[in-house]
Image: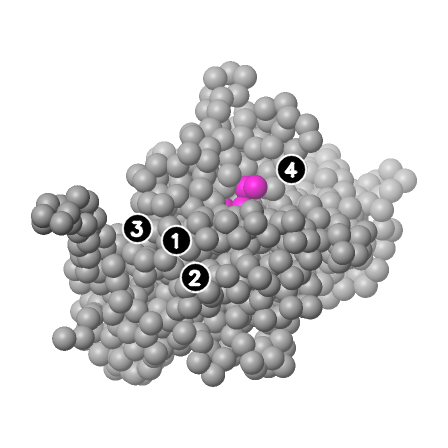
Amino acid sequence: AQPKLWSSEYPRLYTLLIEVLAADGRALEVIEQKVGFRRFEIVDGLMRLNGVRIVFKGVNRHDFCAETGRAVTEEKIRRDLITMKRNNINAVRTSHYPNHSALYRLCDELGLYLIDENNMETHGVWDMISRGRKDISFALPGDRPDWKDILFDRVNSVVQRDKNHPSVLMWSCGNESMGGSVILEMSRLFKKLDGTRPVHYEGVHWDPRYPETSDVYSQMYTPAADVRAFVRAHADKPFILCEYTHSMGNSNGGMHLYTELAYEEPRYQGGFIWDFLDQSIRTKDRFGAPYLNYGGDNGERPHDGNFNGNGIVYGDGSWSPKLQEIRFNYQNLVAKVGAADITIVNRSMFTPSSDYDCFVTLLRDGVPVEKRAVATDVPPLSEGAIEQPFAPGKKPGEYAVEVSFRLKEDTPWAERGREVAFGQGVIGAVPEKAAPMKHGALRVVRGSNNLGIFGDDFSAMFDLMAGGLTSYRYCGRELLKGMPQPNFWRAPTDNDRGWGMQAKLAFWKTASMYARAAGGIADSAGTVRKELPLTMNEDGSVTVTFNWKLPMAEQASCALQYTVWPCGRVGVCLAWDGDKSLPMMPEFSVLMKMDADYDDVTWYGLGPDENYIDRREGARLGLYKKKVRDNMARYLIPQECGNVTGVRFATVTDFKGRGLRFSGDGLEFSALPWTPHEVENALHSYELPPVNYTVLRVGLRQMGVAGDNSWGAMPLPEYTIDAAKPMKLEFCFEGILG
């Protein structure tokens, strides 16, 4: 009988029993081991598992634990691998040494592919050569035969220990050590000891004298567009990115450009995220509160700061918001929702869609209206369609359809019902008919320095000297803490620091901190003006406009306009005419403050976790609610976080539901306990000041978080903000009672 083959999708194992018997038949030694049957090979320039082209949806992993450092337990390894499986990761590179032996047994059991890496790295030497400080003769081990014995011993050790694990698909000579004849001979030794597995080594990309060292092309942090160009020009070997989408802090922007490329260019066969877990140590601050520390926190010099904090999970193993994107980009089932039908693309190698339960849900303004189970039967590596079971309803609202694939049975890594893939699409909207409401006419009162607008249950007051809205009271409660102001800045991310955002875009930080309205009732010389920045509109509303001058650039200004309606709604318009002399803008938003008691935020938009214009493929349209403090991601160094996009409306309320409601067309929205400047000033979470406000940023656009690397890669042009172009942000807010 033919054995059932092992794969990540079906990790079928058999029990192998080996007995060593004495001459009289007594058992001297008995070994029981789980084994699997599979065939991994390179055919016609493509890697194939059991005859099928493979795509690695991988991650790099170090043996590391926040409590015990390099001494990891099987329990923690299992926890990490289950996290990977639940987020559609199918492969691990053991960077940069053979990992704990339990990892291999668990990968066999759970179904994860391995690139098993030999213990070799001479990064310091590699760095000097790659920067041009030394020539290739400086490489270690390079062409130096005195390194052979120790390296050959390591190759032999890893092969003899791990050769019987079906999860090990490739051997890797090591990491970042350039090339040379010694590494070529290591590759040959791998093949002599085990002729069934290809050999990987990225270093020949930097030192191509011996290209036969590696059976695959391998690079690190190459932009997706450059990967496409390379694989089109080099058809003799498969290509992988052994490290990509550097996950330091708020990162992984543009990851979808790589994952989609694997299905557009056959020779690109996936990559391995850098990396899985923040290498941080659990400790306590001076007041005894626990936190996760990083380089330099223990007084050591020199150190590399937080540069080992590159995980898609935090140092304690808990999930970071970045997993939302990774889980979606790595899913094997793609659902494309249309008005008439739903197309299902099955990217699985061996699993039909019928192995999963499929549910289709109709949502109105993010709230489920109806849910149906539907049958699908799309074979692996093919696509099919099912009829769209829903049409937009009759009630006012935006209608979306969500498709969810879920496990039919319990597995070793998840319970029945866990979602493995989803897709969404908006199928229509029914406009709301404005109900006629009677409101008294607005009363406008001018004081010596202020302008008051009074309605039935609210009032708005403008400071004509400072040039802005200083009070909004609704049903007797003041809802603002300070004057809304234009904002162009975000707290730099690790990636931002890597490309020098603070220096290159410093103009916008200064503009955010020191922009001032250009005179309300007084001009720059202090002369009192008779005219007011006020317009009485035919619909009974009142518009107040202030021009804000930006420091360090005389010609740069923006207009912040408020329109107050009798119902109590306030329209806000921030207009920018464009200025070709200025650098790209990090953010275009209005920053507002409320009292810290308003700490519940609800929004209808993309979520549930933070998302950005270059990292929102995995965010889904819905109605979400969080505490403001929970929007603060636990990155090792505080930085920009908590933003959400595609927001139709949001509320920020106290425990009784009183507060403000915001509405607009696809807004970006952030509610945090601190301003971007306060976040930027802290190097650890415990350095953040006491919470005094809820800080809101209602925006048109924020530049992407990037992630091709963390040492110079900026957001791609399509995810930036060109300050030369005119922009207009429009939204409304109004008081609510809950």
Asked if residue 310 lies in the magenta stretch, the reply is yes
Q: Along the horizontal axis of the image, is 351 left or right of 528?
A: left
Q: Which quarter shows the C terminus?
A: top left
Q: Position of residue 578 (x, y in %)?
A: 76, 62
Q: Say which amino acid is labelled 3.
A: Arg
Q: Along the horizontal axis of the image, is 49 left or right of 178?
A: left
Query: Mark 1 and mark 4 in contact (Cβ < 8 Å)?
Result: no
Q: Which mark is residue 193?
A: 2
Query: Mark 2 and mark 1 in contact (Cβ < 8 Å)?
Result: yes
Camera-near label (3 vs 1) is: 1
Tell me how far mark 3 sits from mark 1, CA to CA.
Answer: 15 Å
Q: Which residue is mark 4?
A: 304
Answer with mark 3 or mark 1, whichever residue precedes in sequence: 3
Q: Which mark is residue 105?
A: 3
Read off the magenta span: 308-313
Q: Say which amino acid is labelled 4.
A: Asp
568 is higher (above) or lower (below) than 405:
above
